[in-house]
Image (cartoon, rainbow, N blue to C red):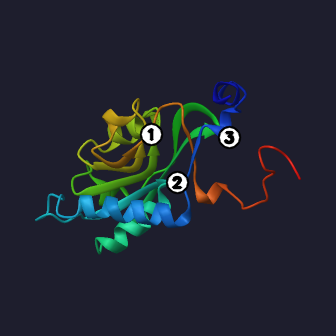
Amino acid sequence: MSDKRDANRLPHEKGFHISWDQIHRDSRALAWRLDGMGPDNGGWRAVVAITRGGMAPAMIAARELDIRTVDTISVKSYDHQDQSDAQVLKSPDAALMGDGTGILIIDDLVDSGKTLEVVRRMYPKAHFATVYAKPKGRPQVDTFITEVSQDTWIFFPWDMALQYVEPYRGRD
């Protein structure tokens, strides 16, 4: 019976659903892992969030690590659920960034690695951290918390709404 269910599963049903509470816990775990790893006596000069997904984890990490300088880089690599070539839409302050030394760049997820590859070319000495990582993109990440399979779609809380779901076997 489970084989039938797996064969009839829609692509979005092979998903990993993340709650606000879970992303907060995992982002704090990322901050804990990054604590003391910076080049300035273990500290970081700044946090740069890759928008939009990296903004919540970056804010949490900046708070936990007491980093007051926060900026963003906007990279578009998805059109809805289809990946495309990564394109930088907005860069952080050039004087702040330099070659990336002492900069912590944070995203929610590395999937194919295309986004981080583009940003790493811009800031080769930055430290790249994600909360979640898929195998294809792992080489682009210096630090991450949880690895998921390449074919899993992660549903983040900012993309979801609570709603009623019919029981699998239908109504009474």
For numbered disc 3, what is the local secondary structure? Answer: loop
Residue 148 placement: quadrant: top left
Q: Position of residue 12 (x, y in %)?
A: 67, 38
Which residue: 18% across, 59% down? 38
The reply to whether residue 68 is visible in this rendering is no
Sort mark 2 into few (<14), some (14-19) or many (20+) by Cα contacts within 10 Å: some
Of 156 and 123, which appears nearest the observer? Answer: 156
Q: Which residue is mark 1?
A: 148
SS of the residue at dot 2?
A: loop
Numbered circle sitting on residue 53: 2
What is the C-alpha distance between the residues marked 2 and 1?
17 Å
Residue at image location 67% in from the left, 56% down from the top: 160
How far is disc 3 from disc 1 in space, using C-alphas?
A: 20 Å
Question: Which disc is residue 87 wearing?
Answer: none
Q: Earlier in the sequence, mark 2 or mark 1?
A: 2
Image side of residue 168 versus residue 62, left or right: right
Give the class, few, some or many, for how many residues have Cα within 10 Å of label 3's Cα (few <14, many ≥20): few
Asked if 122 appears above or below 107 in the picture, the reply is above
Answer with mark 2 or mark 3, whichever residue precedes in sequence. Answer: 2
User: For the residue marked with disc 2, what is the amino acid?
Assistant: Gly
Q: Which residue is mark 3?
A: 80
> In the rendered image, which quarter contains the N terminus?
top right
Tag 2 and tag 1, C-beta contact below 8 Å: no
Judged from the image, the secondary structure of the residue bearing numbered disc 1 is loop
Between 146 and 137, the one nearer to me in the picture: 146
Q: Is residue 69 left or right of residue 23?
A: left
Task: Classify 10 Å Cα crowding around label 1: few (below 14), some (14-19), many (20 and above).
Answer: some
